[in-house]
Image (spheres, rainbow, N blue to C red):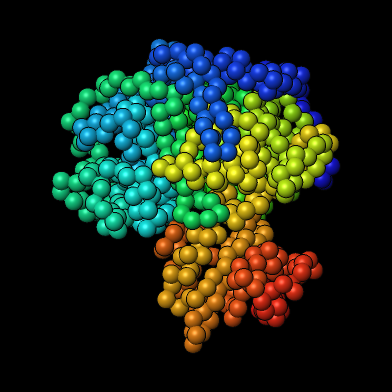
Amino acid sequence: MEGRVVEVQDAWRQGALVNDAQYREMYQASVNDAETFWGEHGKRIDWMTPYTRVKNTSFEPGNVSIKWFEDGKTNVAYNCVDRHLETRGEQTAIIWEGDNPDESKHITYRELHAQVCRWANVLRNRGVEKGDRVTLYLPMIPEAAYAMLACARLGAIHAIVFGGFSPDSLAQRIQGCGSKLVITADEGLRGGRKVPLKANVDEAIKRLSSPIVDHVVVVQRTGGAVTMEPGRDVYYHEAAEQVTDECPAEPVEAEHPLFILYTSGSTGQPKGVVHTTGGYLVYASMTHQYVFDYREGDVYWCTADVGWVTGHSYIVYGPLANGATTLMFEGIPTYPSNSRFWDVVDKHKVNIFYTAPTAIRSLMGGGEGPVKKTSRASLRVLGSVGEPINPEAWEWYYKVVGDSRCAIVDTWWQTETGGILITPLPGATALKPGSATRPFFGVKPEMVDAEGKVLDGACEGNLCIADSWPGQMRTVYGDHERFEQTYFSTYPGKYFTGDGARRDADGYYWITGRVDDVINVSGHRMGTAEVESSLVAHPKVSEAAVVGYPHNVKGQGIYAYVTLNEGENGDDALRKELVAWVRKDIGPIASPDLIQFAPGLPKTRSGKIMRRILRKIAEDDFGSLGDTSTLADPAVVDDLIDNRQNRG
Ligand code: PRX
């Protein structure tokens, strides 16, 4: 199956934005002369003050600086809403599909405009100004999009925290960016179960080291009982009665921050990734159009959560900038049945569908029946994102979901990249199952070996990007040095992605996964260090080391080696207790799948834990443990192997 090539079908090429020859020509132009290319494509959005300078970027160690369209002024909300009013005011901007299949609604661009303005006025009445940070902790309801766009309208910077994070994680993020205002809902609703969002916000605020939050705006989603603190908390629907639905969009500099999004790295606390206005929107909208071959009138559905970057760029900003109809789904793929995705596709006649391999793998488990009883005739393009898609899942997506009729776009990118960097284009790229294929316009991938030597031709190595693209993150919030250190110091002069990859003889990229201490669980990024620091905070734990291991559905699972304090007994009850501890501390996405109690961890004589060995044991790969003779106590390895947990 490795060598299989799926040629571009005639139907994909017909009416597509670009064919193969056009892709090659545009790609060459984009990398030969980025100024001219982006100078032209920057005009795809409306500017209140047009730019005259296009690119001003440096990856130079000690002097990393990224500016695009820097003397232009624009507003993201204006581009996503106002500019469409004249031509498509009555067109649906957002289709919302509730957790309950009986609940859905269509929001036109004109309605969206009124909602965003009202939201902006509610925020402004509570002192939100240009440059202020606003934390959003919301379920997948249209209000999430309204609130994001309202922040953008005022020039305020939103920082969304995924609704699955714990009060502690939320507190850390509110504190990290200094939000004075938090937007949440009474409760979220997923798969028929309620998520106590407001209660979590109350807990988070109690844990802040300084009382920075002045206002909490609460959307009523379920009507569940919540505690409202007088003077601080207000229901959105009550606040909205006090304001009009008109509010001008504030023109901001192209490099004014649009949002902060926290993401996990190999060390320390999550980083606040900063994306700015002009370049980000140009890149998000352009990739949305080309990668999904978006056509006028298409219904487009990305199943991500707005708490992740995919939701930012490809539910809200890219599609709305393009005047698309974007579907927002509150629920989960398995509720009320395994057919839900495909039922929704049929109900709303979805043409473009974008999801994660983990969702596909979990649905594969239910067999073809739940898919085949639906029509899916409207589908044209199927996207994948978040982790490598294994060829088996790719084939199932292609054959069973797409009836061998739809193009598959396996899109590789990161929170840091703002938009898709490596991807097929439906009308242009012959597909290879499991490969993200070729770079998007303006993207210069470079493969390097461990010493930083640039590799040519077919090779395997670490994936870097040699030059800037407009959607690139600009800094780590409040810590530019960490930005330089994390991304530009390993291979000086290049952006290092943290991913390993293979490039084949056709120049196709095959992403093999993270080469740092980041693991990818169900498409969610987790720093092993974060899980470790949570585990060692437990009173019975003395030491912990966390690694990833191959998991049939999640892609990677979390394997934790735990050394207990003297006298503690490692049994199943304690395993359960530790899993619950991490869930409560970080959130359900960080729950260890397997915990092995280990009297000792493999360390070098200088005390460094040798994770390479732990990874191999977690993968059941004992044949290639490498040289263990440099360990302070080589005998611990045998014990670790003897007592390893069953991967199942
Ligand atoms: O390892 C890569 C993997 O996800 C990482 C980025 O995670 P995050 O910032 O959470 O963004 C996810 C959504 C853009 C990458 O470093 N990854 C993402 N997409 C793919 C992928 N790995 C292989 N193939 C992909 N298509």
Query: Is residue 398 in view?
Result: no
Q: Is residue 398 found left or right of 157 in the rendered image?
A: right
Q: Quadrant of residue 637?
A: bottom right
Vertical order, 590 against 535 (above or below): above
The percent position of residue 93, horizontal first and vertical second, equals: 44, 26
- 289 sits left or right of 100 in the view: right
Residue 31 is situated, as x and y percent measured from the top left of the image, at 68, 23
Residue positioned most to the left: 230
Q: Position of residue 283 (x, y in %)?
A: 55, 26
Is residue 608 toward the left or the right of residue 236 in the image? right
Image vertical order of residue 48 relative to residue 568, above or below = above
**Quick check: can you spot residue 267?**
yes
Residue at image x 84%, y 42%?
A: 3
Give the x, y percent position of residue 41: 57, 17
In this rendered view, identify the residue nearer to me: 17 or 51. 51
* Residue located at (34% from left, 50% from top): 175
Residue 456: quarter of image: top right
**Closer to the camera in the image, 140 or 96:** 140
Q: Residue at x 22, y 34 (%)?
A: 127
Q: Quadrant of the C terminus?
A: bottom right
Question: Can you name the residue that lies furthest to the bottom here?
Answer: 567
Is residue 502 positioned above or below 533 on the image? above
Camera-nearest residue between 610 and 226: 610
Total tally of numbered discs in the picture? 0
Depicted 546 relative to depicted 38: above or below: below
Residue at coordinates 62% horizontally, 20% vertically from top-left?
34
